[in-house]
Image (cartoon, coloured by chain):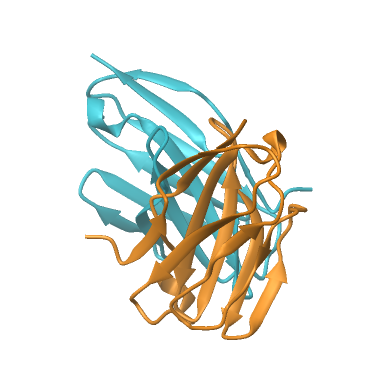
Amino acid sequence: RKEVEQDPGPFNVPEGATVAFNCTYSNSASQSFFWYRQDCRKEPKLLMSVYSSGNEDGRFTAQLNRASQYISLLIRDSKLSDSATYLCVVNNFNKFYFGSGTKLNVKP
Amino acid sequence: EADIYQTPRYLVIGTGKKITLECSQTMGHDKMYWYQQDPGMELHLIHYSYGVNSTEKGDLSSESTVSRIRTEHFPLTLESARPSHTSQYLCASSDWETNYGYTFGSGTRLTVV
């Protein structure tokens, strides 16, 4: 079983839509969680960390559910520039595990 | 402004050549990593290091080797390049405080012909 699982998508949404991604992780002892964004042929870049109480950064909201072992990312008012692959990342004892990514296409 | 640097950005090389991909970071991070990623595919960890003179193989078997003689430098070497090594190689680093995640370099896109 993979450490981190994500729906690969693609999610095709119109501009202005709200879209949500989920990610599940297998190790209940995982310590820290992140969402990364990767544009085509570029390196992944940290989008936001995910805290137990949930956290928001502008149009982006991340939540963690330890009981069910999943994290989520909500994007409100989608922009064309949000089109990218979103990677879920989980840290277990100093090793980072990456999901395979969820592709988002925001259309005009 | 990047704090982790990879060179070269692109490399096209013939089969059988020895190559070294460079990775340097200026953040004083102890932990450094090499990932391999094919276009549209997931990242695979091939090597990591938790400090000077520490190197470990990752989850994906690789014919490459690494060294960590200085904290800031983590080069990856292929003794004899083959077309199957064609891929993007991403270097990353992180602090011991794992709440801050990784910082990635911009990658080396390797093509072996």
Quadrant assignment, res B13 = top right
* Direction from residue B63 to residue A35 in the image, left or right: left
* Direction from residue B82 to residue B34 in the image, left or right: left
Q: Position of residue B9 (x, y in %)?
A: 40, 46
Front residue of B54 and A31: B54
Quadrant assignment, res B33 = bottom right
Q: Does B19 appear above or below B57?
A: above
Quadrant assignment, res B34 = bottom right
Q: Residue B29, can we see it?
A: yes
Q: Position of residue B112 (x, y in %)?
A: 61, 36
Q: Does A78 appear above or below A91?
A: above
Q: Residue B101, can we see it?
A: no
Residue drawn at 47 percent across, 37 percent down: A21
Q: Does B81 appear above or below B71?
A: above
Q: Position of residue B12 (x, y in %)?
A: 51, 37
Q: Position of residue B88 (x, y in %)?
A: 53, 42
Specify the chain shown as cyan: A
Front residue of A13 and B31: B31
Residue drawn at 38 percent across, 50 percent down: B106
Front residue of B13 and A27: B13
Residue drawn at 52 percent across, 70 percent down: B74
Specify the chain shown as orange: B
* Direction from residue A13 to residue B15 in the image, left or right: right
Front residue of A42 and A97: A42
Identify the image quadrant of the C terminus of chain B.
top right
Residue drawn at 68 percent across, 38 percent down: B15
